[in-house]
Amino acid sequence: MTAPHSVTIEGRGRLAVTGVTEIDRFDDETVAVFTQEGELTICGTGLRIGRIDIDAGELVLEGTIDSLEYTDDRPAGSWLARLFR
């Protein structure tokens, strides 16, 4: 079962993400993953996967983290949630 989504950054050198459902792409400068909160893109230099467990929804990246960006790729939600956007 996938853990709830959270992001923890330790000194710009280590990033732990939970709630990961799928990895979209990965290289040493960009990692893009799908989470319960939308697509998360992490940019930096020398990025490498320290640990990954998609079944548990966990990802640990190491390297220099420069930025994080969410792209709202979530389902639209209930009619009540859409009403108050």
Image (cartoon, rainbow, N blue to C red):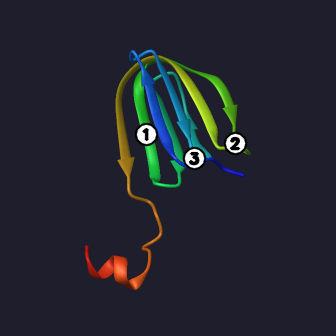
Q: Position of residue 57 (x, y in %)?
A: 65, 43
Q: Which label sits on residue 62? A: none
Nearest to viewer (mark 1 / mark 2): 2
Residue 40, placed above or below residue 85: above
Residue position for label 3: 19
SS under mark 1: strand
Residue position for label 1: 41
Q: Position of residue 65 (x, y in %)?
A: 40, 22
The extreme front residue here reads 4
Cα separation between marks 3 and 1: 14 Å
Amino acid type at image mark 3? Gly
Q: Position of residue 82 (x, y in %)?
A: 33, 78
Q: Earlier in the sequence, mark 2 or mark 3?
A: 3
Cα separation between marks 2 and 3: 9 Å
* Residue nearest the observer in this picture, 21 or 43: 21
Locate residue 56 relative to residue 80 in the image: left or right: right
Residue name at image x 43 percent, y 33 percent: 42
Nearest to viewer (mark 2 / mark 3): 3
Amino acid type at image mark 2? Ile
Residue 40, placed above or below residue 63: below
Amino acid type at image mark 1? Thr
Nearest to viewer (mark 3 / mark 1): 3
Residue name at image x 37 percent, y 47 percent: 70
Q: In which quadrant is the C terminus drawn?
A: bottom left
Q: Residues within 10 Å of mark 2 (few under 14, many from 20)?
A: some
Residue name at image x 53 percent, y 36 percent: 17
Disc tally is 3
Q: Which label sits on residue 54? A: 2
Q: Earlier in the sequence, mark 3 or mark 1?
A: 3
Q: Residues within 10 Å of mark 1 (few under 14, many from 20)?
A: some
SS under mark 3: loop
Image-quadrant location for residue 29: top left
